[in-house]
Structure formats: structure tokens, C-alpha cells
Amino acid sequence: MEDLTAPVPRERPELLNNLAAVVAQMELMRPEALRVTLAVRALQGCGRVFRLRLRQDLFAKSFVSDQISCFWSHSWHGGRRKKVVTLLTLYNGLPAILCGVLAALVMLVLFTFGSLPGFQRVADSPSDHSAWSLGTGFLVTALVFVFWRPQQHVFLDRICITESDPQLKAEQILSLAGMLKRSREMLVLWDSSWSDRLWCLFELSAFLKSKADSEHSRLLVTPTFMGPCVVATFLGMFLAVVPLTTFPLDASFLIPMVFVCVFGAFGALCCAHAFRSYFQSVDDLKEKLQSVNLERTRSICCDLNHEGDMTCDREIVKDCITIWFGSQEAFEDCVRSEVLETLTSELEQSVFTRPWRIAASVPFLWACMDLAAMNAKTQHWLIAINWLLSGLTMCLLACPLNIDPQLNLDPNSEENLANLAHRFRTRQPTAAREALMDVLVLLLALPLFLCGTALTFLSGALQPPLPSLSQAAFYGLLELVVWLKRTGCFSCARSKGQETGQPARTGHQF
């Protein structure tokens, strides 16, 4: 076997053709070339492995495997912090929320039965107020988010490709296509530099080729701004509810309500800015993919002008793509059409799924747990149940409905936060105009939320026992109508009526 580590002059096309043929076979040079690592090892130290100038050899953190659960594709020229936050959100987000809810529930029970001290919110009143569920839930969520240990087997180049053994490194690079063929998922951590890197497009082309031969492979493209957007939304929700359980109450109820409105507006403004920034990043991705061109991509060998007669990666990659797709233009057309269409749908509709939207709304549940614990401790059980129902309504129905990006595809839909953020996502030339656009989105998104809140206060007078049931029914009906429209029930009924000559039943139009 030829020495693959020896420098190859560019004027030797025969060897370049041989290398391209070897890579295009999508096989491993030897079984030991395929190595994976645990996701927790790649995320240790808040993702210090992604530091560009890190000199530590991390190959010992990997081990031989016969398949890869998830192949991480990323650009080393993108923002490190955004990548790390996005990975922490994908792998640690849901465990963190679940642990936070469990901890808040424990605090509710302990405070109800007098095991935890309270504090005064009203002068000369018993110390029966609680902020344990909100504070503990937030603290536990933050700690689990950072320190959770995900065990998925992933491929990350800096850990899984050796730097100390030149022979094995050459074999691993030639086996990259074979590794992608043996990957169940490929996670693209997209930023503005990803589609400009030659090897990133090579990884995409190899995975698309292997995906055509397998029904079990899945391509996941996630902008690196997704993680910061989810975190900002969660923090915005948390800030919005802090005054509900912690600010002092006195004879003038107006003062705490002002603080509630101020904190709530600031939190909602964070959410509006986060969503606008996310949709801006999606637009950037679409623009990049529409103009993708292998000739304009960059690689280290070309940046160094092929010093030392090093092999040109571009020629090998182009030859492989030609073998897989028939021509370079066919691959580029595939990216601009099929890949772009799929990603547009996925990134605008399926990134912020209902579980993520509920997770971001959990602070409302924690705050209502504290208010319920306060009333349960003083034996006001009906009021405590009412607060718990209100928290569940806000967490499971109201807030997810107000930040549902899937509604933005329907021009007749009610304007919610994500819908408006998508509509007004255009990047402004100055920071001041960006801030004004965030405020505009927030103001336009208020009516639906205020309608449910006003209904709660109104139903308190009409239905004193459990006014939260009216609020839950209101948002529940909205969710039902949205679900019926999304599943096409209304359009099916309309079509059936037209076919039979009978008037079709129509539902409420959003």
C-alpha cells in the first residue's frame, strides 16, 4: 500500500484520481479508523474543545466503534460560544427542565408542610410567602444545563481524528465518507462560514449520497443561534415572573403591578429580539445555500498556496462529488433545490417544537407553584388549586401558543410573538432601529396574551371557585382550532362539501 502521508505534487493527477476513487467508495481504510466519543466529553469545560488555539491532544477521549450516533459537522471559523450553547440546548436542555420541575415540586411540598421558612411581602403579616419553587427550579435547571452528562456516541473531528499518528490520520481522513455512511444522524451546526468551507460541503455531499441508500439516516441542520434564542426566551420568561413571587405588597397594589409590567415587558423584549435574530440567521443560511459554489469555497491547502507540494483537497473533493452525483453542478443544484426546500421548512417550523416552547414557559409554572404553596400553607386549598391550574394553563397552552413559529405560514393566523418576529425579521442598519423593531413586535403581540389575562380577571367575578378554568378553556379552544387548521381538517371538510354539492363546515379563521 502506498504511503498516503507523503506529500503529493499537484502535477501527479494519477495519484489524485486514485485517492478520489478510494474516498468515493465510502469504505473504511481499516476498522480502527472509525472512532467516536461521548457527547459529555465534547462538552466538558463548557466546550473548550472548540477553542481554535487549543493545543491539547484529545484523541484519548475517543474509542473505536462500528457506527456513529451523530456526526457533528461545523466550521472552525464560526462562533465558539454559539456552537456550545446550541449543543448544550440540544443535549442538556430537556433533562435540565425536567430536573428543575421536579425540584420545584419538592419545594412546594416542603413549604406547604412547614419544612421551609417563608418571608413577608406585606407589612405586619405572617411569613407565609414563598419563592422556593421559582428560585430552586431556576438554579437546578441552570446547573443541570451546564453539568449534565449526555452519553450519546458522537463524532467530533478534534477528538476522533488523531494528531500524533500521521499514518492513522491519513487513513481517517480518507475514511470520512465511510464514517458518514455509518452515521445515523448528521448534525450541521450552521453559521455564516459553514458553507464557505470545502470540507463542510464534502461532508454534506457524502451524507446525502449515503442517505439516498438508507432510510434510517437523518440530516439535522441547526443554526448556531438556535441555542442562544432558546436560552434568551427562557430567561425572558423567568424575568417576567420574578415580581409575581418576590416583590413587596402593600396597601397600594399599583406599585407591584408596575414592576410586574416592567419586568414582563423586558423579558418579552428579550424573547422578541431572540426570535428576530434567529429568523435573520435562517435567512442568511438560505441566501448562502442559494449561491453555493464549490469553486468559491475555501480550504487550508489553497489558503497556503499548496506549500511543500501538498495534495490539493479541492481536486479530491470535486472528483468524489462528480462520482457520487454525476457532476459538480448536479450537487450544487441538489443543495439549492432539495436541501434548501427541506431546510426552509425544518428551520422555520420544526426547530421550536412544542416541547421546547413548553420548556421555555416553565418559569410561569414555578411562580404559580410558589403562590399555590403560600395558600396551601394557610389551608386555602381552593385558591392553591386555582394557582396551579393557572400555571399549567400558562405553561402548556398560553405561552406556547404565543411563541408558535408554525403559525407564521398562515396569513390569516392571529399575530403571535414568533409570527411577528418572522414578519419583521429584516435586519436594520443601526442598533437603535433594531431595538425599535423589537419594541414594535412586542406591542403587536400583546392583544392575544392580554385577552386571556383579562378573561381570567373577568371570570374571577363570574366564577369565583376556579376562575382559571375559564382561562384554560379559552386557550384550549384556541389550541384546538390551530390544531384543526394545521392538520387540514377544515380544508378537507370544505373540499368534501364542494364535491358533494353541500356547504362545507368551516371553523374559526385565524
Image: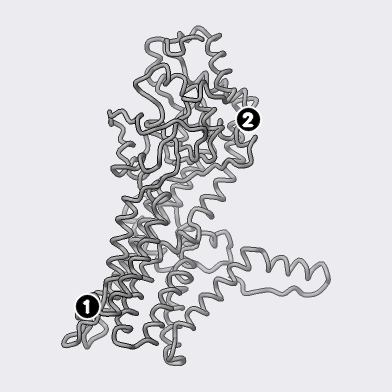
Type of amino acid at the residue the image marks with label 1 = Gly
Q: Which residue is mark 1?
A: 118
Viewer-closest of 311 and 281: 311
Distance, label 2 to label 1, CA atoms, is: 68 Å
Residue 256, by quadrant, is bottom left
Q: Which residue is mark 2?
A: 330
Residue 423, percent across and down? Answer: 49, 58
* Residue at horizontal 25 percent and vertical 79 percent from the top: 114
Closer to the eye: label 2 or 1: 1
Q: Secondary structure at mark 2?
A: helix
Viewer-closest of 1 and 510: 1
Type of amino acid at the residue the image marks with label 2 = Ala
- Image vertical order of residue 316 relative to residue 466, above or below: above
* Residue at horizontal 43 percent and vertical 51 percent from the top: 278
Colour convention:
one colour
* Mark 1 burial class by Cα count in 10 Å: few <14, some 14-19, many 20+: some
* Residue at horizontal 47 percent and vertical 25 percent from the top: 33
Residue 375, percent across and down? Answer: 32, 84
Viewer-closest of 453 and 21: 21
Say whether residue 441 is left or right of residue 106. Answer: right
* Mark 2 burial class by Cα count in 10 Å: few <14, some 14-19, many 20+: some
Position of the C terminus by quadrant: bottom right
- Image vertical order of residue 164 relative to residue 127, above or below: above
- Image vertical order of residue 469 relative to residue 308, above or below: below
Q: Secondary structure at mark 1?
A: loop
The disc label shown at residue 181, or none:
none
Mark earlier in primary sequence (2, 1): 1
Q: Is any part of residue 82 visible from this angle? A: yes
Residue 324, percent across and down? Answer: 62, 26
